[in-house]
Image (cartoon, helix red, strand yellow):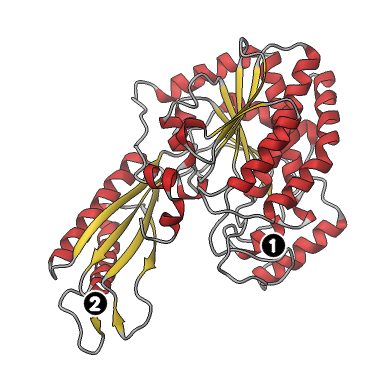
């Protein structure tokens, strides 16, 4: 579909004017990486930017301390929400260089959320300015969504009714391709299990060995999975499992995460994991306490929004990487994935086949409000959730992708206000896909601790 050239030109002008500020914010947020639920400095930078551009900002939206809602425009018209993320990942700090140079303990932007927050805020600003100049009725909003990495922020906001009343949601993310997405991602369920036994000198042993029980429990569940829960993807870590071999720990914490395309299959597997852990622990008298974290559906595709974003991206073109950008990414890729050929998606494509490997906490939201997503590409030799992704996120070589996304989201938002029939079509598609299913949020188990003492969660003492 040919886009309106006047509107597209106006959006490009606004994005170009914002570009120096956006790239500055990419670096600023990268320099203050904050754990999920603790993103106060990042929120201050983003909301200050939005307020300077005429947005009215509400902090602590939905009872989520590091969430925010920023609004500009005419609330009598369509209401378009653009999602912003800004949390970092534990243990992934690194310098913006093609080498592993970091302590391995501080947070780092190994998922590129230092780009998503500014880029998506910039899209909202550009769209709101153009809509005002054209006299288009409608409101452009930024929904500041913390704690995506632990599957909490958007689920908590949805449970609080923050997404109610929106006509469409738009967002972006770095990945391994440039394009609009109209395919599902995985549903996820995860929780922390606390095994408690006796502390003792390791040489003497302990009748109630919490560590051995936890190790046996996860081994039993993994052995059970192929027959009872086929296709489930399982990942786990021991967040607390002792400090030295000579002291048997009295408490062991296992954080387990399960993924599958089917939400019900994930929930059944999670229940099976819980039951298996209880059964194994009971054999030795070890106690197990479940601390449910969260569960979320996978993304529900929307072809109407997907094709609109695809049109916008084809009009804009792929990221404008320089030769210097390419050289840095090639060097970083060679260090992070030695022996692997350098590969970077440099075109624009529409992705509507298969399923994405990740889970997103906006999955549930996409089942109640049409959601459109844009991706920009990183080299395949730079692993996501890895120190190398942090390194690239802090380097100017990473700017071209999110800037492309800024323009695409802004243009799509303007087109939705100018052509409200597209919103009607997107909502009709959503209704067809959902059918008679009753969509309700599974209440997260970490809401209270994240609202009152998120550091306790990260220190594994909640």
Where residue 157 appears, x then y in whole percent?
47, 33
Where residue 211 appears, x then y in whole percent?
27, 73
Q: Residue at x 27, y 68 (%)?
A: 214
Look at the image and tell me in which quarter the N terminus lies.
top right
Residue occupied by mark 1:
391
Where residue 137 appears, x then y in whole percent?
68, 11
SS state under label 1: helix
Q: Earlier in the sequence, mark 2 or mark 1?
A: 2
Q: Kindly report which numbered mark, 2 or 1, lies closer to the viewer in this rendering.
A: 2
| 143 or 359, nearer to the observer | 143
Q: Which residue is drawn at 28% across and 71% down?
A: 215
| 420 or 27, nearer to the observer | 27
How many discs appear?
Answer: 2
Q: How crowded is mark 2: few (under 14 residues within 10 Å), some or many (20 or more)?
A: some
Where residue 23 appears, x then y in whole percent?
78, 46
Residue 373, placed above or below residue 231: above
SS state under label 2: loop
Residue occupied by mark 2:
199
Look at the image and tell me in which quarter the C terminus lies.
bottom left
Residue 101, placed above or below residue 87: below
Gap between marks 2 and 1 measured at Cα: 41 Å
Q: Residues within 10 Å of mark 1 (few under 14, many from 20)?
A: many
Is 8 on the left-hand or right-hand side of 76?
A: right
Q: Which residue is drawn at 71% across and 69% down?
A: 334
Residue 337, quarter of picture: bottom right
Q: Most extreme residue toward the bottom, as rendered?
A: 203
- Residue 363 visible from this viewpoint: no
- Residue 452 visible from this viewpoint: yes
| 435 or 21, nearer to the observer | 21
Residue 296, quarter of picture: top left
């Amino acid at each position: 579909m040919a886009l309106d050239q006047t509107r597209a030109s106006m959006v490009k002008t606004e994005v170009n004017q914002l570009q120096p500020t956006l790239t500055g914010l990419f670096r600023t947020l990268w320099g203050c990486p904050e754990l999920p639920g603790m993103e106060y400095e990042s929120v201050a930078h983003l909301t200050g930017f939005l307020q300077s551009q005429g947005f009215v900002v509400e902090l602590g939206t939905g009872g989520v301390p590091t969430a925010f809602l920023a609004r500009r425009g005419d609330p009598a018209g369509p209401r378009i929400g653009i999602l912003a993320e800004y949390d970092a990942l534990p243990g992934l700090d690194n310098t913006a260089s093609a080498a592993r140079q970091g302590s391995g303990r501080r947070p780092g932007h190994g998922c590129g959320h230092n780009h998503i927050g500014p880029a998506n805020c910039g899209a909202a600003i550009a769209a709101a300015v153009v809509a005002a100049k054209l006299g288009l009725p409608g409101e452009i909003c930024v929904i500041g969504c913390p704690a995506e990495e632990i599957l909490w922020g958007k689920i908590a906001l949805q449970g609080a009714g923050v997404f109610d009343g929106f006509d469409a949601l738009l967002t972006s993310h770095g990945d391994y391709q440039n394009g609009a997405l109209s395919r599902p991602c995985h549903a996820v369920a995860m929780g922390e299990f606390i095994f408690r036994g006796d502390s003792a000198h390791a040489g003497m042993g302990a009748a109630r060995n919490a560590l051995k029980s936890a190790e046996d429990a996860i081994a039993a569940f993994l052995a059970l999975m192929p027959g009872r829960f086929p296709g489930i993807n399982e990942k786990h870590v021991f967040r607390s499992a002792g400090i030295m071999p000579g002291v048997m720990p009295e408490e062991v914490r296992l954080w387990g995460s399960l993924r599958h395309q089917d939400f019900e299959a994930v929930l059944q597997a999670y229940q099976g994991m819980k039951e298996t852990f209880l059964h194994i622990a009971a054999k030795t008298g070890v106690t197990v306490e479940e601390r449910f974290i969260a569960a979320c559906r996978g993304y529900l595709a929307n072809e109407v929004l997907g094709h609109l974003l695809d049109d916008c991206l084809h009009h804009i073109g792929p990221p404008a990487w320089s030769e210097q950008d390419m050289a840095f990414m090639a060097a970083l890729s060679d260090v992070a994935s030695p022996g692997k050929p350098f590969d970077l998606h440099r075109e624009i494509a529409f992705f509507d086949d298969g399923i994405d490997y990740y889970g997103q906490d906006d999955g549930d939201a996409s089942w109640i409000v049409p959601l459109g997503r844009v991706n920009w590409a990183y080299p395949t030799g730079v692993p996501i959730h890895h120190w190398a992704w942090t390194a690239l996120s802090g380097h100017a070589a990473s700017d071209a992708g999110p800037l492309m996304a800024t323009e695409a989201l802004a243009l799509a938002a303007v087109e939705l206000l100018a052509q409200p029939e597209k919103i009607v079509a997107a909502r009709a598609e959503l209704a067809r896909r959902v059918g008679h299913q009753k969509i309700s949020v599974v209440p997260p188990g970490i809401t209270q601790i994240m609202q009152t003492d998120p550091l306790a969660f990260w220190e594994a003492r909640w």
